[in-house]
Image (spheres, grey):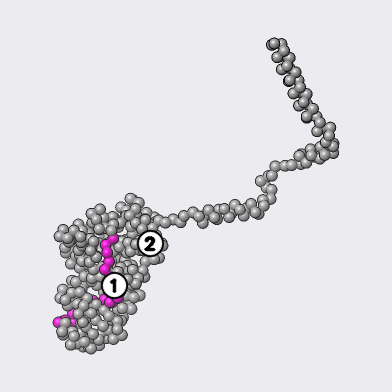
Amino acid sequence: ITIKRTVYLITALVAFALGLSLGLLIPVYIMPVSIARNVSSIMRSVRPISSSSQRFDTVSFVAESTTIRAQQLRPKDSRLVVDGIYWNDEIEAALPTGYGEPEAERWRRFVKNNPVVKIEEGCGRMQNRLLTFEDGTRACCRYRQNTDQIQGELFSFYLGRLLGLNNLAPSALGVVHSRDPVWSKVRAQISLAQWAEERPVVLTKFIDYLQPAQIPRSLRNSNRKLHPPDVNHNDRSKSVELAQWSDLIVFDYLTANLDRIVNNLYNLQWNPGMMDAPAHNLAKCSKSNLLLFLDNESGLLHGYRLLDKYESYHSVLLNALCVFRRSTVEAIERLRNDQNLANLLERSLNAEGDLVPGLPEKNLKILNDRINRVHDQVEWCRKQY
């Protein structure tokens, strides 16, 4: 049986080999010789495409289109903070215009050359008055028995101009003189207001459409922070307001203003809900979303006298801040490096007539120290972010 199986196996292998050989040889005999030669010639003429060969425009176009499309689909950089600690250009461009130096200069000229036709109660404190000029323009007139508060309001405004802040309504120094053409039409009303002659006053342009301004949520709780991680996910309108808050914190720290956010902080000891209340002496223009830094009379003089009592509150707010406007930081650096702050403030005062004393030397030293402190905070934030 084994021999038979072996024979069958050998026979099958021989048959398979013969069939394979016949299958390969038949096309050679059937195909014409000329065709075989042509095929061989064509195969030999084929060459690989070299790198210098001409490329089809369509291929290049597809490649470029793919790149452009990929760039269009790639999400834009949505960071609101750039270079570590600065609001980006989009936020800067969206900030309300506010009131710059041209508006301040026009206001100074206006109040010196236009008559007041009406004085009425308004604008806060008892002896303050709301003035109406001949053309209908209105102003808040700040009248004080204490010249310190007039100086505080005026020099705070000058400092705001040096910092490039547009959140302070135009203000100018004046003097009550009932025989002057500016005041002569309201002599009786001056007497009713119990204003003394030759008293310096500050006239601030009255701004319409104001509403209360709320303190940002990130500054309300005990863990107060306005750092890059706290703002990068906000929408644009909220960030535009926060950018103005970053200027406000710097400004109020420099002047040691007692009558704004420090007022809210100080009163927390009696009212736990104070930080949820509107910010004191801060308003928001409903038409432009501009924050207005109002009533700065405690700045630079009265506030400096009370630093022992209130400095901890001022520092809490500055320490919470690590996002700045680039222009404000540049102004701080300029004032710090040039060491000419006294001359700049004196020049502003001289332009208005020297009706009040300049800022005392002691107060100038405190202001320069506080400028250095803001600079140190900026540097600390740079190292963190």
x%, y% of residue 30? 83, 34
Does 324 appear above or below 50? below
SS type, badge 1 = strand
Observer-nearest of 323 and 350: 323
Residue 211 visible, this orientation: yes
Which residue position is annotated with label 1?
Answer: 210
Residue 236 is tagged as: 2
Q: Specify the farthest residue to the front.
A: 1
x%, y% of residue 76? 46, 56
Does 191 appear above or below 161? below
Q: For this view, does 178 lie left or right of residue 46?
A: left
- Residues rendered magenta in the picture: 194-216
**Residue drawn at point x = 36 percent, y = 69 percent:** 96
Magenta-span inclusion, residue 202: yes
Q: For this view, does 166 lie left or right of residue 144?
A: right
**Residue drawn at point x = 25 percent, y = 58 percent:** 220
Q: For this view, does 4 lie left or right of residue 308?
A: right
